[in-house]
Amino acid sequence: MKKRLNVLLLSFLYLLPLHADYHAIEVTHGGTIRGLVKYPTETPPRAMFGTRGDANCPAGIPQEQLIVKQENRGIKNVLIVLDIKEGKPLKPMSARLDNKNCRFIPRIQWAPKDTSLVVTNSDPTVHNVRALRHDVATFSVTIDPKGPPAQRPLVETGLYKINCDRHLWMRAWIYVTEQPYVAITDGEGRFELKDVPAGSYDLMAWHEGWNEAGTEHTGQPRFIPMQEILKVTARKDEVTDVLLDDLQPTFLYGK
């Protein structure tokens, strides 16, 4: 029991702002960490969320919090973070979040600290986009149908949860970081981190969860997040293949 509590505590702390002391260096002969994140059992059928109350939205929205490729049980949209203190520089990136067909696109993304997030609305309905970090609102913006984009700076590191106050099934995530060794798994559950300095690191896989646990105080459905932390080794000019197939519940955003 003590070991399990320690794991859960580590899980809770792990997505707090890390890498504040990250240093950019020139990386030569770096290694590649390549991996697959697998769903642990047979996957349940995808559910549909009803969209009562807004005739401008589709009649039903397929659930997006869990998307699994049946052939290999690979999980899409898993956040991958390498705990690393120094490595290649973090290059500027753009960050966009579109409201389209009453869904957020993309579902999850990552961006460098101080990136300006561009929020757009491609729908014929109003969206009230609210960003929360540790369940504290960091910004909210109302965007009219096909109105001009809004821009909001991402000035704090960590994981942001994005809701629409008018459409309670809408959800997105943005991970803000000061280091570049971050990835999102693709439709086959795969990811790749390149130019990793030789050494041993903790590799974290985080997913928003698939077990429903009631509703949040804002009315959105609550899912228990899942996480796995794996010790990995990067070797010069070599590829290290890893498998993450033991994601466990974590407290982060689980309350």
Image (cartoon, rainbow, N blue to C red):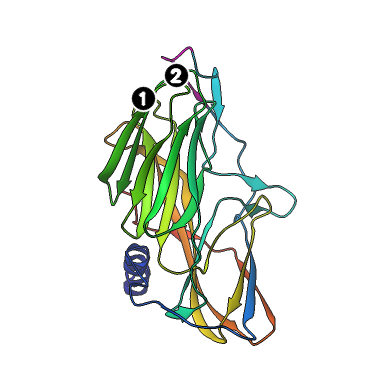
Which of pointers 2 and 1 indicates the residue nearer the eye?
Answer: 2
Asked whether 105 or 245 is in front, the reply is 105
> Can you name the residue that lies furthest to the right here?
71
Main secondary structure found in the magenta portion: loop
Q: Is residue 186 left or right of 26 when viewed as pictured?
A: right
Mark 2 vs mark 1, CA separation in Å: 10 Å
The quadrant in which residue 34 appears is bottom right
Residue 55, position as x, y percentages in the image: 48, 12
> Can you name the residue that lies furthest to the left here?
136
Q: Is residue 133 above or below residue 233?
A: above
> Can you name the residue that lies furthest to the top here?
55
Q: Secondary structure at mark 1?
A: loop
Residue 125: mark: 2
- In reply to whether residue 250 is colored magenta, the answer given is no
- In reply to whether residue 50 is colored magenta, the answer given is yes
Q: Is residue 135 left or right of 4 when viewed as pictured?
A: left
What stretch of residues is rendered in magenta? 49-55
Tag 2–tag 1 contact (CB < 8 Å): yes
Residue 131, position as x, y percentages in the image: 33, 42
Residue 166: mark: 1
